[in-house]
Amino acid sequence: RAADVRMEPSVNVFSSSKWQLEKTPIDNDVIKTTFVLKHDKAAMEAFERTLLDRSNPKSSNYGKWLKHDEIKSRIAPSTDSVKKVTEFLNSFGITEKDISVNKMGDMLTVSMPVKTANKMLKTEFALFRSASQRNVAIPRITKPYYLPEEIAQHVQIVADIVRFPSLRQGPTIFNSDGKVSTDPEFNTCGTKCNGFTTPDVLKTAYSFEYMTTATAGNSMSVAEFQYQYYDNTDLQSFGDACGVTADVEVTIGGNNPKICEAGGCVEALLDIEYIEAVANPIPLTVIYSPTYSLLDWVNQVMDMADPPLVHSVSYGNDEVQQTSTEYMDSCNEQFMAAGAMGLSILFAAGDQGVWGRSGVGSTYHPDFPASSPYVTAVGGTNFATKSVIGEESTWDCGGGGFSDTFARPSWQEDAVTNYISKATAAGVLPDQNLWNSTGRAYPDVSALGGQTNPYCVGIKGGSFGGVAGTSASCPVVAGIFAQLNDVRLKAGKSPLGWLNQLIYSAEAAACFNDVNDGSMNNCNKGTVGFAALDGWDPATGYGSINYSCMAGIINNF
């Protein structure tokens, strides 16, 4: 019999301080897991070249996005791989009805009893309960897992059995001091939100107009995980108070509005209210994924016949907490495929500055997926002067930095090298031991997200509060790009797709409000982060977007 191969061999820790091991036997519980198949390395490299060409504004192929089947024919694992893994599963008594192959032919999702999984993967599963959210319990392995060599050669990872998700703590809710601000836009959502960032504040700051009609074929989405549902009462009261419309056209994965009355749902309501405030009536889909899994979410998106064109995802974790490069590579390959289909995926860059969720240590902790080259990472800013629409400054807890996993892509090389030399000359470059100077650098762009003027959000079945974070910045930037897609679709052009090469082009880079006051994303007093300087920087990327400038150039490509 062939030797067994230890999968994800870099993983040596099978526990987490934030999750408690339960004694309950779970042998008869049914678990759902995904066998992610390996792509051919040469095929992926060729595919990446195709994507780099079609997303380059200077290329004659710009915007010529691929359909599902065109991507599949380029990168799908062989039908032999699918067959071998299916037969392997069958040999453990798992029938076709419990195995589903995704549209791209690179993931097999399987339901099976824990005792079968233990035997198949030569490991032991246990139930782990969240220390902070006691209603959340997940099965995870307690020691390494293995596959026979002849199967391991086809499988990159078995997903959602190793990683412990980072559960988002409910955000801090700020109350308005009720003071009327000089700039009237801060007073446009009723007295409970005086002094908060409102849709009208964003409209003035980022020079967009509210839309009255959307072009056929345009669409956008927010991703929600972890009990983040929404309720129409709150969407309605927000819309009424702020003079905008916030509604959801399609919900995938279910919804449980009851949770919102007790004050849950804040993150989902923030996402929906602000992508809608910016870009309604472009149809919005809420994709709810109950599994805490990025791969599960992206798989849901890629399996749709007509996936939304823009996706806002306010979710992430530190790279070091993702436990394996194989896992991050699997996600990255899916993001690449989504970009080639003409989808724009934006992720919040994180709310702990350079130090990440792991906190202050001997190195910075970059955020994933924000550090993936194939997503657009959105950082956070504050107004330089409270309640005055104008210059912006770095939100000191906005995520940013350099990946320890992904190498720096060619399209950002000039921008990043310029930053490093400027910061060196100014004497503000953090010690090189803290960060990887050859990594993918992020964020790419930013928007208001800090606590100087928190966002006005309708919550708790009709009341209001202020909320901050890059999970506010992200849906705003996504909404602006959805509006820009509308400009292109109206002109008979293709959607913007994977955005990063466009953002780093000289024409587009001129359409951002640069943050350059030297403010830092250190987030912890007495420590150093990256400083915002002229042009791109790892504190705010290129800064915040000027919609009217961008709308003026977007059809030149």
Image (tube, rainbow, N blue to C red):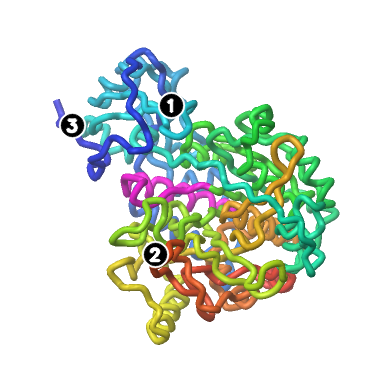
Q: Amino acid at mark 3?
A: Asp
Residue 402 is labelled as: 2
Magenta span: chief secondary structure: helix
Magenta region, residue range: 315-344
Q: Position of residue 455 (x, y in %)?
A: 68, 54
Residue 137 is labelled as: 1
Q: Position of residue 293 (x, y in %)?
A: 46, 38
Occupied quadrant, residue 261: top right
Q: Is residue 34 left or right of residue 263?
A: left
Q: Secondary structure at mark 2?
A: strand
- Please state which of residues 72 and 210 is positioned toward the viewer in this rendering: 210
Q: Secondary structure at mark 3?
A: strand
Residue that sits furthest to the bottom in the current view: 425
Q: Amino acid at mark 2?
A: Phe
Mark 2, Cα crowd under 10 Å, few <14 / some 14-19 / many 20+, is: many
Q: Which corner quadrant holds the C terminus? A: bottom right
Residue 161 is labelled as: none
Occupied quadrant, residue 505: bottom right
Q: CA distance from mark 1 to mark 2?
A: 33 Å
Q: Nearer the viewer, mark 2 or mark 3?
A: 2
What residue is at 36 percent from the left and 73 percent from the top?
A: 430
